[in-house]
Image (cartoon, helix red, strand yellow):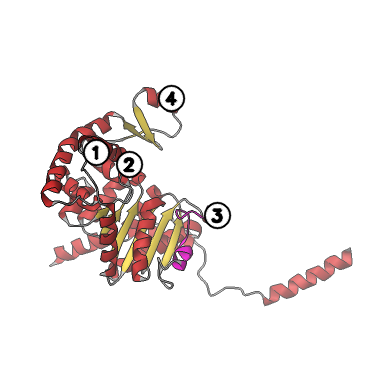
Amino acid sequence: MVANRETEYKKNLKFMRKTVTLDNHTSVEGYNFEDDFNFDDFLNSFATTGIQATNLYNGIEIVRMMIKDEAKIFLSITSNMTSSGLRDIITFLVKHKYVHAIVTSAGGVEEDVIKTMRPFVIGNFDIPGRVLFESGVGRIGNIFAPFDRYLYFEKFMNPFFDYIYEIQKKRGTPFTPSEFIKELGFRVNHEESYLFWAAKNDIPIFCPGFTDGSIGDLFVFQRQKRSDFYIDVVGDHKKIVDMTLNMDKTGAIILGGGISKHYVLNANIFREGLDYAVYITTAHEFDASDSGGNQEEAKTWAKIKINAPTVKIKTEASIAFPLLVAGSFAKDYHNKKEAKKSY
C-alpha cells in the first residue's frame, strides 16, 4: 500500500513539473477600498474579479464596441424590467437614441403607460398572496401593483381605441403592434415614458405577444364591440426582418428571455446573425429552453455570427443592467456632454 502511494506521488510530481504555470496571465484581484473610491476604477476592477463580475465587465466592453462601431442595437426586455426601476434607465437609452429597436412583451407596453398615471411601489417577496389579493394588490416579485392601476389604464385606453379604430377604417388596413404602440406613445405624451420617446425618436417597439397581458383583454373587449377590429402581427414580422437586412452591423442586449429574446435573434437570421450579443439572465442551459440558451447555441441557427463578441452574464438584470449602462452608454453620454462644454 505504501509503495503504491509512493509511486502515485512520483507520477503526480512528474505531471506537476510539466504543468503550465500561467505566470504571464492576469492575476485575480478585487477592488482596493483602501484608496479613495473611484467608480470607473471600481467597474474596471470587475475585469480581474472573476466569476460573473468578469462576465459583466466583458459585457460593458462589448457594448462599448457596439457604440464605437455604430452598430444598430436591439434591446430585448421582459415586462418585469418595466415593472422595476429599470424602466427609467430604458427611457434614458431611448431618449438619447442609444438603442434602435425595442422588443418587449405586453406588460412592457401597458406598465409604461400605467406608470405615467400611478406608480408601482416597493413591497416584499414573502407577503402571503391571499393578503394581497384580498387587499386588491397584485405582486410582481417584491413590487406591488394595486389593481386600481389597471382601471386607470382601461379608462385611458378606451378613447384611444376609438381613435385607432377610426384611422384603421379610413386607411383600410389594421395597425401592426409597433404602429399601435407608436401612436400610444404620442398619446401618452409623458417624458418619463419610453413609449413616448420611442415615438418621438422614431424607434420601433415590437411586441410579438401583444395579447398576453391586460391589453390583450382590452383587445377582446374591442372585438366584442367591433367585429372588424384587428391587429396585424405579421406586418411587424416583415418590418423587423426588413430592418435587419438594411443594417450594416447589429448588436443585441437581451435582458431575460422568452418571446422577446427569440424575436430579436430570429430576425437577425436573415442577415446571417448579430455582430454583437450581450445576455443578462438567470436562466440556464440545462432545460434546453431558448430563455436559457447561450450564444453558442444561437450561433448554430445563424442568429449570431460565428466570430461575434458575445457574453452571457448569469445574474439578475436589476443589478447588472444599471452597471452595464453606467460603464457604457452613460459614460459615452457624459463624455460627449463634457466635450460640448469645452467648445
Q: Report, in whole angstroms, how far the alpha carbon at label 1 lies from the one at label 4.
A: 33 Å
Alpha-carbon neighbours of circle 3 within 10 Å: few (<14), some, or many (≥20)?
few
Residue 83: mark: 2
| 328 sits left or right of 127 in the view | left
Q: Report, in whole angstroms, how far the alpha carbon at label 2 lies from the one at label 4.
A: 21 Å
Image position, residue 79 (x, y; %): 34, 45
Whether residue 287 appears in this view of the structure is yes
Which mark is in front, 3 or 2? 3
Residue 130: mark: 4
The residue that disc 3 covers is 286
Magenta segment: 286-300
Tags 3 and 4 touching, CB below 8 Å? no
Q: Tag 3's secondary structure?
A: helix
Which quadrant holds the N terminus?
bottom right
Residue 100, quarter of the rendered image = bottom left
Residue 223: mark: 1
Image position, residue 260 (x, y; %): 36, 53
